[in-house]
């Protein structure tokens, strides 16, 4: 990833507040996930840490001094990323449509703060006695079960001004969502967020807390605003705060927040504001005591072995604690940059997130479906039908092999397989934590050959095995049938009890099956 000759006029995506510089860059997407990544503009080399949770397109890189998350949408050629340096520098990669990509350095020193706003318009039905009993039951359940990962949803809105400066709105939202999820992962919180859908708002950018009220009332009720999601968030291009959100509103359903674009991606403010909805408060040095959860506060992280301290997502900047890191306070998690705890017995927002997660995910029921749209800064196109996918690969004969990827977690191993077009199964040694791809690669090309299916087309995938199983995934030849063309061979393989891959020579359709060989210490799984 390096700079390129700069145009006389910078693209529209360079417009916005708190931007120190905006430079057009070239990206090489072929190196993603294959070891080290060199960021030429920052003169730093990063190691691949793994995929973000179960995502197939969000990558986590890091080094002693840099934490880097980026999401890739290859069908659009779109990449978004955020690099947080331990000297408090913050850089964002943004896709600018036909103008390519830019690297923006944010003016972190002058970014506005995040504000928690008390909810004064609670819904009587949501705060009824029956509702309080139900929420208490969710909390008791969460206290008994502290490990099950729970996913909540957010409906994301954006102002016309945000749309005018953002070429790939869906890509931006995906990056913010994945970075928020990495914060939960870093903090050992069994909670994840998923975007329910996105929509352009009917209100404009404005300063002051009034925008939160205007957004809340935009559709008449918070239930309508959430659109059956668990929360609603507004992205704006210009604002005198980094963000603002109601405090502790799971019970009322007013899980509503507003975040500035430059802070949503580059300052972790998207997760910060939703955190207020969940009942997370700022650090004790600046905030009143959390009335619901006494330990629900952000934390100033001690300097330890570093030259300076840091602060968690819900903590305000303080002398010796300028750098905000993608962690929620947790006394049981050590920040590697300082070697010190990220929380204390009186500052444990991770516990509050864990306790509140079941109640949060029950706010909406996701019953209202969202239109399938492709969103850009200028147009919105509704997709009404999907063409039939051709699952065959012309002029191709494929064989299989194992390819070593590296040491990583099971979820990262599976995620790597999902984004690799050749991979159809993965194998991991649990003791060595080594990950291998079982892939089909091209050995011959000729007009008489056809291969299938296309593994990166989920509708084409034909596995008959469980998603995950003990042992080593292995392939063997099964049988031959006659087929008129690739589509017919794909159909025959789909109908077969075992077949999940095939090759064709003229009208001969050769079928192959994946099966499990029992080896202690190994676990395998299929692509999907």
Image: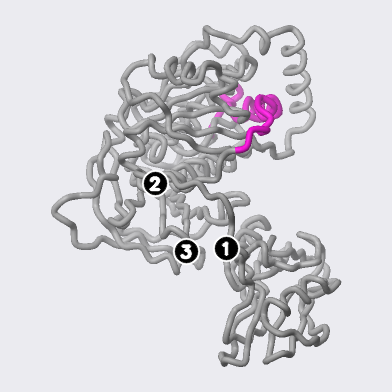
Q: Earlier in the sequence, mark 3 or mark 2?
A: 3
Residue 414 place in picture, x, y as percent: 66, 60
**Label 3 close to label 1 by CB (< 8 Å):** no
Q: What are the residue bounds of the magenta stretch?
A: 342-369
> Within 10 Å of the Cα at label 1, are there few (<14), some (14-19), or many (20+) other Cα atoms?
some
Quadrant in which residue 523 is drawn: bottom right
Q: Which residue is mark 1?
A: 419
Q: Which mark is residue 208?
A: none
* Numbered label attached to residue 376: 2
Q: Nearer the viewer, residue 369 or 527?
A: 369
Q: Which mark is residue 32?
A: 3
C-alpha gap between disc 3 and disc 1: 10 Å
Q: Is residue 262 left or right of residue 191?
A: left
Which element type, helix, strand or loop, lies under badge 1?
Answer: helix
Q: Nearer the viewer, mark 3 or mark 1?
A: 1
Question: Within the magenta stretch, is there residue 343?
Answer: yes
Residue 29: tell me if it is visible. Answer: yes
Q: Secondary structure at mark 3?
A: loop
Answer few, some or many: residues within 10 Å of disc 2's Cα (few below 14, many 20 plus, some between 14 and 19).
Answer: some
**Residue shown at 23% from the left, 41% from the top:** 20
């Amino acid at each position: 990833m390096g700079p390129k000759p700069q145009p006389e006029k910078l693209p529209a995506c360079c417009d916005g507040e708190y931007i120190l510089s905006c430079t057009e860059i070239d990206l090489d997407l072929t190196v993603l996930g294959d070891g080290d990544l060199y960021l030429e503009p920052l003169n730093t080399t990063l190691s691949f840490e793994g995929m973000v949770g179960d995502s197939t397109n969000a990558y986590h890189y890091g080094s002693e001094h840099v934490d880097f998350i980026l999401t890739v949408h290859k069908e659009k050629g779109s990449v978004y990323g955020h690099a947080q340096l331990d000297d408090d520098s913050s850089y964002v990669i943004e896709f600018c449509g036909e103008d390519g990509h830019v690297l923006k350095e944010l003016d972190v020193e002058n970014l506005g703060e995040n504000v928690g706003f008390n909810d004064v318009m609670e819904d009587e039905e949501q705060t009824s006695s029956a509702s309080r009993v139900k929420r208490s039951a969710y909390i008791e359940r969460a206290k008994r079960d502290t490990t099950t990962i729970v996913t909540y949803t957010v409906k994301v809105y954006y102002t016309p001004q945000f749309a005018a400066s953002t070429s790939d709105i869906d890509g931006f939202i995906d990056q913010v969502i994945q970075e928020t999820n990495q914060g939960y992962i870093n903090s050992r919180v069994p909670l994840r967020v998923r975007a329910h859908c996105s929509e352009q708002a009917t209100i404009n950018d404005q300063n002051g807390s009034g925008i939160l009220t205007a957004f809340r009332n935009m559709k008449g009720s918070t239930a309508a605003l959430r659109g059956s999601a668990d929360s609603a968030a507004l992205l704006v291009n210009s604002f005198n705060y980094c963000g603002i959100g109601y405090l502790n509103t799971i019970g009322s359903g007013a899980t509503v927040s507003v975040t500035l674009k430059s802070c949503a991606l580059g300052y972790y403010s998207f997760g910060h504001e939703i955190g207020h909805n969940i009942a997370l408060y700022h650090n004790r040095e600046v905030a009143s005591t959390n009335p619901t959860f006494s330990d629900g506060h952000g934390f100033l992280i001690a300097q330890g072995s570093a030259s300076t301290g840091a602060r968690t997502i819900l903590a305000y900047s303080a002398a010796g604690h300028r750098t905000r890191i993608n962690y929620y306070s947790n006394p049981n998690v050590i920040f590697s940059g300082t070697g010190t705890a990220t929380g204390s017995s009186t500052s444990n927002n991770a516990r509050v997130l864990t306790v509140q997660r079941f109640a949060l995910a029950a706010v909406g029921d996701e019953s209202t479906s969202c239109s399938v749209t492709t969103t850009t800064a200028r147009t919105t196109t509704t997709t009404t039908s999907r063409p039939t996918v051709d699952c065959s690969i012309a002029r191709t004969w494929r064989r299989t092999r194992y390819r070593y990827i590296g040491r990583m977690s099971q979820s990262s191993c599976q995620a790597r397989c999902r984004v690799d077009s050749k991979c159809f199964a993965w194998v991991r040694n649990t003791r060595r934590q080594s990950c291998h791809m079982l892939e089909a690669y091209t050995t011959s090309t000729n007009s008489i050959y056809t291969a299938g299916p296309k593994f990166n087309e989920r509708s084409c995938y034909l596995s008959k095995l469980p998603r995950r199983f003990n042992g080593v995934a292995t392939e063997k030849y099964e049988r031959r049938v006659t087929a008129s063309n690739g589509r017919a061979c794909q159909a025959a393989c789909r109908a077969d009890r075992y077949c999940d891959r095939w090759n064709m020579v003229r009208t001969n359709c050769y079928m192959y099956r994946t099966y499990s060989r029992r080896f202690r210490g190994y676990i395998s799984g299929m692509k999907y």
